[in-house]
Image (spheres, helix red, strand yellow):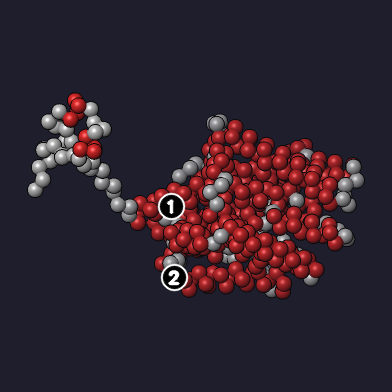
Amino acid sequence: MLNTMQPVATTPSFNFFLTAEVQQNPNYGYIEPTPLRVLPKQPARTVEADNVTLAQQYASRINIIRLIAIASVVWGHCLYSIEHKVFFKQNEQIIQTVLLETGRIGTVMFFIISGFLINDKLSRFNPLGYLRYRLFSLILPWAIFLSSFTFIQTMRELGLQQMVHNPHHTIVVMLGLFRIFLFHSAYWFIPVSILSVMVLVMFKQYVKNLWFGVLLACVTLFYGVNLYYAWIPVDHTKAFIGYIFFLWLGMQIKTHSATVQNILNHLSWPVLSGLLALFFIAACFEAIKLNSIGCADPYASIKISNSILSVIAFLTLLKSSRMKRLNRLNPQNYVYGIYLMHCIIITELMPYVNTFIAHYKFNNNLPAMALILGIAFSITITINYLIIMILKRSALSFILGITR
């Protein structure tokens, strides 16, 4: 075996390039062995670690979806003044439909979000336990804001003096307004959401079964078809059990998040964008069709095309990683407060907006109305956010819900 401590022999031609000092060195040609670097052993990635990383990634994106969903809901409610307005020009009818449809996507997305978030907790609840769990974080704030909204509108309707001198009539008016706001304002979402979760809690042993999801999808489909035939009241706010499917779907997305991510990774952006555009156009055409047959709620969020559109929009946002900066607005802590407050702000602001539109004779100029309503939406969402931020930092923060 070659002894590495011996000088390495060199040819005369090579020695020609070496100095005499080097040539006379007995250790000339000896190469000091370099110890091998042992890299630290990297821990093998596990399925559990991948799932944790994916869960954190999706948690961040769910917050962004929350923010976009509430923006859609607030925008839809800002458009209430043009929802039942009749425009005779075809281009204005198309603009009207497009504007209103953008305000209907957020509702279904919120139900999917609710299912996504409740998935890991569902098994530990019974119906009464769930009500207790949600009492201070969800139900009490909802009751406070709904009651406040009812009181403000009663005072606007009767005046403070009449309220004081005729308490019986005041109570009758307040109860009537409370019922109207419960079923025909944004405040319908919380009781429907709670009822839907309680149904899933009662049938939690079947939640993982595909047939259960198919059954819930059939119920949702029934409400979508009912918009055409009015077998039962068509108002989407009364479709109490029609939204349970979207909660179930959100739970399945959370349970099978790795599979969902794999599917989304294989769907290119052009494909997703094409699907979004296709079903948005379909939702607009369905709204026009429902309008033409005299449907009482042609822009219902539960209509078939809008349901599919909302699911695709949710998955598209779940795939996207380009809106991380929106997390700086802290959606997790502000979105519920915005939901609770925005009805009050819109109701107080929109009379001034409508007066402005009427004064400058924009009633029959839909593009101008859309611009003004867009400004009103921006003002509403900004004021809303600032009020919630102030309340969050005050002694009244409890009225926005105690985080559990």
Question: Camera-side residue: 170 or 43?
Answer: 43
Task: Name which residue type carries label 1.
Answer: Leu
Element marked by disc 2: loop
What residue appears at the point 80 percent right and 53 percent down from the top-left corner? 82
Relative to the observer, which residue lies in front, 313 or 180? 313
The circle on residue 54 is 1
Percent of width and height locating residue 164: 73, 38
Residue 378 pos. (x, y %):
71, 41
Q: Is residue 121 left or right of residue 83?
A: left
What SS does tag 1 mark? helix
Q: Position of residue 141 (x, y in %)?
A: 57, 44
Q: Which residue has dot 2 on it? A: 209
Looking at the image, residue 159 sits to the left or right of residue 47; the answer is right
Query: Mark 2 or mark 1, which has the lower sequence index?
Result: 1
**Residue found farthest to the top:** 21
- Residue 145, picture quadrant: top right
**Residue at horizontal 59 percent and vertical 46 percent from the top:** 67
